[in-house]
Image (cartoon, helix red, strand yellow):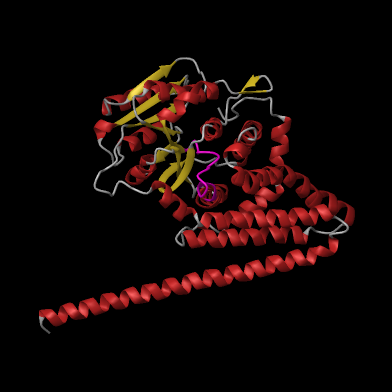
């Protein structure tokens, strides 16, 4: 066989390989669609079975239809995320003129001797010109060995900037110090137990080429996902929360919470709202948590666009036991409640479509869910001695559709089955946390510090 023949055979084999891969991909996609259609059929069938109870409990049936429609709408919105993001960002750093603004990592920390070394090291490893990169750590009154480790890191990385506060002033003030001190155009706020993937770092910066973008949220993933069942459940939840729910919000350029795990901000957009954000209070007391959600809301109020980039990858440490997880969820729910009273005053004027078809339904569901869950899981079984079969099955069917889309987005992600455990955990436990959060709203302690 001569060279020409060998080349022809090689090209033929490559074409055949591409054809096989395309066929496999088509079969996979067709299978996903078919399974989704089956799940949707059973979901509709289940809802039709419950219509017999409409006259007895019309609010229960209406709530079930409302929640189902809302959850499906989030998946549909997420399907348009790529197109929306592409049209917003447009030009990327792959173009002839590389976009490389000066950027700064700002890392507030308190008592993080276990994780701070990895966090800082990963910042200096990012794929970005060192002369345009700044890493600033604010040691907010640590009482452990955090400052000693920072001193060691300073010898390894002379460019590292460390602000040492002997007395704790709070994470929000530490974040604000970074905004005020740094001369960078883009500020990346990152939790002290988190890290950014060095090779995907530019994806966090590129969207700022659009001058309307005020903040970009990276995709968060638990670094300790394989620790136990609880962390695996959170890994599934994080994937769903970022890749589906935040993607759905980003379709409308309105991510309501740019995660504290790792998010980037345009400094010129933040500075005009910085002191209002610092002065946030609720019922006469300063708000000491929910800094990420509050800052995002201030940017939205000014008309800024907040987006999610699924290609920018960050990692964080999630709670490894039930007590810490519940404390974290309690803190998150408190900040969510407080932020609602702030956001609701302007969001309809700024984003009427998103408010009507996303934000208000989300608010309604969040406050109604514990009432409906109590009725289905406690009151009805006690009064009728019947297991809430249809309620549980309905939740699992919606979760199955969500898990199917989850698997479609990343077929190699192994945590998708744990989404069902998270759904059950949410149903029986987390759905009631918002009630406890409302009761304890005036307790402003951090909880895990």
Against 186, is 252 above or below?
Answer: below
Locate residue 190, reporting x and y percent. Answer: 44, 34
Image quadrant assignment for residue 433: top right
Res 418 seen here: no
Q: Is residue 267 left or right of residue 364?
A: left
Foreground: 386 or 103?
A: 103
Foreground: 219 or 423?
A: 219
Q: Characterize the magenta stretch by its predominant secondary structure.
A: loop
Foreground: 347 or 314?
A: 347
Which residue does the image show at 49% across and 48% down from the upper left? 225
Image quadrant assignment for residue 438: top right
**Viewport quadrant of the C terminus:** top right
Res 266 seen here: yes
Against 66, is 329 above or below?
Answer: above
Name, please, the residue furthest toward the bottom.
Answer: 1
Locate residue 186, reporting x and y percent. Answer: 37, 33
Which residue does the image show at 83% across and 55% down from the upper left? 58
Q: Is residue 68 left or right of residue 305?
A: right
Which residue does the image show at 54% across and 61% down from the upper left? 405
**Viewport quadrant of the N terminus:** bottom left
Locate residue 304, reporting x and y percent. Answer: 49, 36
Which residue does the image show at 50% across and 73% down from the upper left? 30
- Residue stretch rendered in magenta on the structure: 248-261
Locate residue 98, reporting x and y percent. Answer: 26, 43
Against 193, is 283 above or below?
Answer: above
Q: Is residue 213 left or right of residue 94?
A: right
């Amino acid at each position: 066989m001569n060279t020409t023949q060998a080349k022809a055979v090689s090209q033929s084999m490559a074409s055949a390989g591409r054809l096989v891969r395309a066929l496999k991909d088509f079969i996979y996609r067709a299978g996903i669609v078919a399974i989704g259609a089956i799940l949707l059929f059973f979901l509709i069938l289940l809802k039709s079975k419950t219509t017999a109870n409409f006259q007895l409990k019309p609010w229960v049936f209406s709530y079930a239809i409302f929640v189902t429609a809302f959850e499906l709408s989030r998946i549909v919105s997420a399907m348009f995320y790529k197109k929306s993001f592409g049209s917003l960002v447009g030009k990327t750093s792959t173009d002839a003129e590389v976009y490389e603004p000066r950027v700064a990592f700002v890392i507030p920390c308190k008592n993080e001797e276990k994780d701070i070394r990895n966090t800082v090291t990963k910042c200096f490893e990012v794929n970005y010109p060192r002369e345009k990169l700044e890493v600033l750590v604010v040691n907010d009154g640590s009482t452990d060995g955090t400052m000693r480790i920072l001193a060691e890191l300073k010898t390894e990385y002379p460019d590292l900037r460390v602000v040492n506060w002997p007395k704790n002033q709070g994470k929000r003030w530490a974040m604000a110090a970074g905004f005020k001190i740094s001369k960078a155009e883009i500020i990346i706020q990152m939790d002290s137990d988190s890290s950014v993937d060095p090779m995907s770092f530019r994806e966090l910066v590129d969207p700022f080429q659009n001058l309307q973008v005020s903040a970009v949220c990276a995709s968060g993933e638990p670094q300790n996902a394989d620790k136990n069942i609880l962390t695996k459940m959170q890994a599934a939840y994080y994937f769903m929360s970022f890749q589906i729910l935040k993607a759905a919000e980003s379709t409308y350029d309105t991510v309501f919470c740019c995660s504290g795990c790792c998010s980037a901000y345009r400094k010129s957009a933040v500075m005009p709202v910085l002191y209002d954000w610092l002065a946030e209070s609720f019922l006469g007391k300063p708000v000491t948590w929910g800094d990420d959600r509050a800052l995002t809301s201030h940017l939205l109020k000014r008309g800024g666009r907040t987006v999610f980039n699924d290609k920018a990858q960050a990692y964080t440490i999630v709670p490894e036991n039930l007590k810490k997880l519940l404390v974290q969820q309690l803190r998150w729910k408190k900040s969510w409640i407080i932020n609602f009273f702030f956001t609701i005053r302007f969001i309809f004027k700024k984003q009427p479509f998103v408010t009507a078809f996303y934000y208000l339904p989300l608010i309604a569901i969040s406050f109604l869910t514990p009432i409906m869950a109590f009725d289905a899981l406690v009151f009805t079984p006690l009064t009728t001695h019947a297991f809430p079969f249809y309620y549980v099955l309905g939740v699992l069917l919606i979760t199955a559709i969500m898990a199917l889309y989850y698997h479609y987005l990343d077929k190699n992600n192994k945590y998708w089955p744990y989404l069902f455990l998270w759904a059950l955990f949410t149903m029986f436990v987390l759905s009631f946390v918002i009630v406890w959060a409302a009761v304890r709203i005036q307790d402003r302690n951090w909880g895990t510090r």
